[in-house]
Image (tube, rainbow, N blue to C red):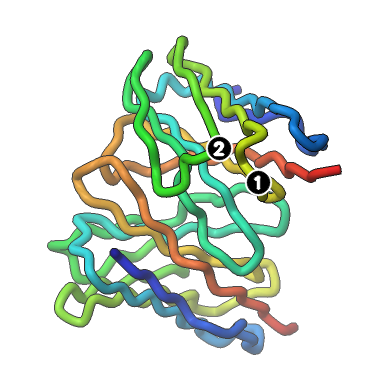
Amino acid sequence: DGGITQSPKYLFRKEGQNVTLSCEQNLNHDAMYWYRQDPGQGLRLIYYSQIVNDFQKGDIAEGYSVSREKKESFPLTVTSAQKNPTAFYLCASALRSGGETQYFGPGTRLLVL
Amino acid sequence: SQKIEQNSEALNIQEGKTATLTCNYTNYSPAYLQWYRQDPGRGPVFLLLIRENEKEKRKERLKVTFDTTLKQSLFHITASQPADSATYLCALANTGNQFYFGTGTSLTVIP
């Protein structure tokens, strides 16, 4: 059963703590993306990766970090430098970058304690 | 920087009518425009893609138009049903690597 998965569904972060959101896909897609969605706002791009071991910053990369060691996996770390991390985080993948259909995961809701 | 605007208010229509959602953009020349559906608490789901050289695209009860002169796309759902109630997002992309999403329009179809 192909698809894109994210875990956990809900994540709680304490002050000063780094947390990592998981994103895995078995669609054999080259491109992967991380977005943040806040109420009443569109999706904003945090990071994207076109190929293994390569990634680029999106519009709001500050306070976040990523890695792309495997084609299937693109984890996002929300660092303590991100002062307003409460949001809905969406991971997506596409066969190739550049206008291709994006397939989204179910999302992770991050809350700050 | 690029700006994408969708219907600023939620749209309520009667079942069976045609819903029309708008997506306007500035400071950008997209090669592609896409429409997604998003249900509460879930990830967006792709619906339709239209390229800059295409005027119209259809898929079952859905129709998308793309006017690069007006910098506008219209998304139509004909014979709307309560199950069509959701938030609809438009997204622009170039032949580069980034997608830009609008804020979305919330559609409610009233039985």
Which badge, 1 or 2, comes first in the chain's sequence? 2
State the residue position of label 2.
A63
Mark number, residue A14: none
Measured as percent of width and height from the top left, residue A35 is found at 52, 44
Q: Quick one: quadrant of the N terminus of chain B? A: bottom left
Q: Is residue B65 above or below residue A8?
A: below
State the residue position of label 1.
A83
**Image check: B9 left or right of B52?**
right
Foreground residue among B80 and B34? B34
Residue at the limit of the structure toward the top, as seen here: A69
Name the element at disc 2: loop
Q: Quick one: quadrant of the C terminus of chain B? A: bottom right
Measured as percent of width and height from the top left, residue A48 is found at 40, 34
**Image check: A99 left or right of A6?**
left
Foreground residue among B56 and B93? B93
**Image check: A104 left or right of B14?**
left
Measured as percent of width and height from the top left, residue B73 is found at 32, 74
* Residue at 48% across, 19% down: A67
**Image check: B36 left or right of B29?**
right
Measured as percent of width and height from the top left, residue B45 is found at 53, 50
Rounded to the nearest angstrom, the CA distance separating label 1 from label 2 is: 8 Å
Residue B40 figure quarter = bottom right
Foreground residue among B105 and B58? B105
Q: Residues within 10 Å of mark 2 (few under 14, many from 20)?
A: some
Q: Residues within 10 Å of mark 1 (few under 14, many from 20)?
A: few
* Residue at 52% across, 18% down: A73
* Residue at 21% across, 76% down: B67
Chain under callout 2: A
Q: Is residue A110 above or below residue B75?
A: above
Q: Is residue A52 above or below residue A14?
A: above
Name the element at disc 1: loop
